[in-house]
Image (cartoon, grey):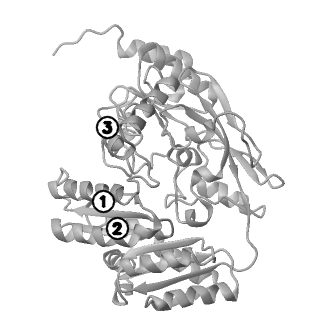
Amino acid sequence: MATFVAYSNDEILADLKQNVAPDKVLTDLADLQKHENDAYGVNTATGLPLAFIKATSVADIQGVLKTARKFHIPVVPQTTATSTVSGSDAIANSFILSTASMNHIKTIDVADQLAVVEPGVINQTLDTEARKQGMFYAPDPGSKKISSIGGNAATNAGGMSTVRYGATKDSILGLKVVLADGREIKVGSQSLKQAFGYNLTQLFVGSEGTLGIITEITVRLFPIPLGDAITGMAFFKDMSTLAQAVNEIRASGTYPTMLEALDADTVEALDRYEKTHYAQNSGAMLILKLDSSTDAALKVIEDILNKYGAQNLQLTTDADESETIMQLRRDMLPAIFANGQHVMEDMAVPLSKLAELMDYIKQVAADLNLEIYTAGHAGDGNVHPTIIWPEDQPDIPENVQLGLQRMFRKTLELGGTISGEHAVGVLKNQWNNEELGEDVDMLQHQIKAVFDPMNILNPKRKIN
């Protein structure tokens, strides 16, 4: 069908290159195809972007938004494109605005226990630099080595240490953000407490680029704990029993930093990937860590593990042995993903409901003949069931769709959420009404309209 247009793409790009240095605007077909879809999500791009812009300054961001407002062009913010929910896939004829090159650590302030960084700084890079000064950055998503602080903030990323230190939001003190109208605002502060005005800092955290473009983040740092970190693993007869043990450890006052769970199928996948033999032990693996501990705390944990029949308990303070155990957790995803096409989910429930959810996921797999690998952050009730299907099936099978629907609705029934730490993106935005309810769903759209009345910032992501 023929369409009538007021401006050609060439005219739009010419305007863009008046507002942003032309060498930062990529329009070659190969470049556009390279950035069309996120690296780790399900490909949901609706077409090639009109341009990929490598911003290196606030002025670049403001320039992109100036052209976007003039021609009503969607703007898709992006840093390292590691979203698992397709949160920064291209929209046809959009601008993909990358802040990956804005990657400077501006300040590491030991006295005030904070750092100020640009959005493109990699999580691991900040943590490494902070540790050189006796501090550390607590949030540790599984993508720690490749994801950026800006992307972590935009999605409120979680991670393995959330059980002790909270998610990304709990380490963010302040932000600078460029709004859709081009203004750069500052929210929050560099103090550990602030109660003045509405809490806009936490409104932008987790907003997935739909309310503004983050240009600077002030994050909290912690002193490296005294004493030796203790890492360990134990095996249980099933995930439900593991979940019960974890719940009791959480209530014991020992304050573990990590309580990670892997079901039997996941352990078997790890064995294939690592050439190990852990699956011979039992039906579920627990990986745990304490930043520092006392003999009394260790005794409490050992007693709880024994109470629930844990086998082959290993605890170590040796750095090399600890790294070997931690590598098992890091290799979990590539081990699972090697088995075929996949979708990894991200539900969280109250701690008391974790065992029930684990049992339900296993039942769904049996009922629908699904290959489901379940692992996650048992210490905070967050699980990641990953459904695998054959590589030669390009479309998502019907039983996979049905399995996701059943798991999501069971999670909501248990008082949980269907997005614990991976954000919403494109994959879950149609569930807003069911999880939030009609009134809150409407408020979400009203908030969006206040900050982005032209709906140019990452439209159809976060909320639909």
- The answer to whether residue 429 is seen in the rendering is no
- Tell me which label, 1 or 3, sits earlier in the chain: 3
Do the residues under discs 1 and 2 have CB atoms within 8 angstroms? yes
- The answer to whether residue 47 is seen in the rendering is yes
Quarter of the C terminus within the rendering: top left
- The residues tagged by marks 1 and 2 sit, at their Cα atoms, a distance apart of 8 Å
As shown in the figure, which amino acid type bears the numbered disc 3? Answer: Ala
Quadrant location of residue 454?
Answer: top left
- Tell me which label, 3 or 2, sits earlier in the chain: 3
* Mark 2: few/some/many CA within 10 Å (<14, 14-19, 20+): many
Q: Position of residue 175 (x, y in %)?
A: 65, 38
Numbered badge on residue 357: 2
Left-right relation of 136 to 447: right
Q: Position of residue 180 (x, y in %)?
A: 53, 24
Numbered badge on residue 461: none
- Helix, strand or loop status at disc 2: helix
The residue depicted at 37 percent of the width and 77 percent of the height is 239
Residue at mark 3: 45
- Helix, strand or loop status at disc 1: helix
Q: Nearer the viewer, residue 140 or 97?
A: 140
Q: Position of residue 176 (x, y in %)?
A: 65, 34
Residue at mark 1: 410
As shown in the figure, which amino acid type bears the numbered disc 1? Answer: Lys
For this orientation, the residue located farthest to the front is 439
* Mark 1: few/some/many CA within 10 Å (<14, 14-19, 20+): many
The residue depicted at 46 percent of the width and 13 percent of the height is 70
As shown in the figure, which amino acid type bears the numbered disc 2? Answer: Leu
Q: Is residue 344 above or below residue 233?
A: above
